[in-house]
Amino acid sequence: DAKTTQPPSMDCAEGRAANLPCNHSTISGNEYVYWYRQIHSQGPQYIIHGLKNNETNEMASLIITEDRKSSTLILPHATLRDTAVYYCIVRPRGAGNMLTFGGGTRLMVKP
Amino acid sequence: NAGVTQTPKFQVLKTGQSMTLQCAQDMNHEYMSWYRQDPGMGLRLIHYSVGAGITDQGEVPNGYNVSRSTTEDFPLRLLSAAPSQTSVYFCASSFVKDRTYGYTFGSGTRLTVV
């Protein structure tokens, strides 16, 4: 299974862009990169996913490097409500729908 | 559209007691799963199911049983509760065939075993 590596914590000023990195150097060609977040012990919330092209939705943008070994989740204008733990997940090949959660990055958005 | 509903939200058990955590979804998702989250940790997969009548073990299945008699429901049974099972339990569901579809999680059951 492809593993992911994320910094344990990050700070961001309110209104600024939050850039959350993720390393997945062993990712396979048909594995997607997913991002979820968990706000204060609530159930995790799906944010975005991608295969090899950059993706954008109403919540965030996902930038995947050309070699697919790393990605960055971008929250363009972070608010206090974006304070959460952000998980970068690679869906393992042959494991059906299972998602394996690592430690994630605890993002603190400060006024 | 309620999504994924978990009951109860909170529960305190004595060591050795048994109980069932309920999970129901109304989105016609084939895939359902149970995770546990210990304080300050990520989520760990307990059991999962890809459809009615089909279940399989995840990363930490010991001490738990599941069954899937309908598409909508996926209960998690604690056979003999232990303090090590104190945790927050999350149920999640998704479609099986669409590998790009995101999970929908319930709001969690906070279980304390004393």
Image (spheres, coloured by chain):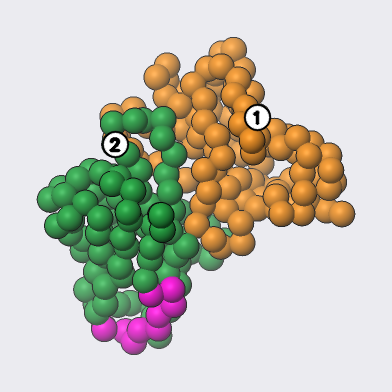
Q: Position of residue A28 (x, y in %)?
A: 42, 20
B5 is higher (above) or lower (below) than A88: below
Q: Is residue B15 magenta?
A: yes
| Residue A60 figure quarter | top right
Write down which chain is painted orange.
A
Chain seen in green = B
Circle 1 packing at 10 Å, graded few (<14), some (14-19), many (20+), is many
Amino acid at circle 1: Ser
Per the image, is B67 magenta? Answer: no
**Count of all numbered marks drawn on residues in the image:** 2
Residues packed near mark 2 inside 10 Å, few (<14), some (14 to 19) or many (20 plus): some
In which image quadrant can residue B6 be found? bottom left
Q: Is residue B91 visible?
A: yes
- State the image quarter where residue B110 is shown: bottom left
Instruction: Report the residue at 80% width, 45% height from top.
Output: A12
Q: Disc 2 residue type? A: Val
Please report the bounds of the magenta region as a residue range.
B8-17
Residue ID at (23%, 48%): B49
As measured in the structure, the alpha-carbon distance from the residue carrying label 1 to the one carrying label 2 is: 25 Å
Q: Which mark is residue B96?
A: 2
Residue B64 visible in the displayed image: no
Residue at (27, 65) in percent of width and height: B76
Q: Chain of mark 1?
A: A
Residue B111, compared with residue A43, is above or below; it is below
Examine the residues drawn in magenta and state their main secondary structure: loop
Q: Residue furthest top?
A: A66
Q: Secondary structure at mark 2?
A: loop
Q: Which residue is mark 1?
A: A61
Left or right: where B41 falls relative to A80: left
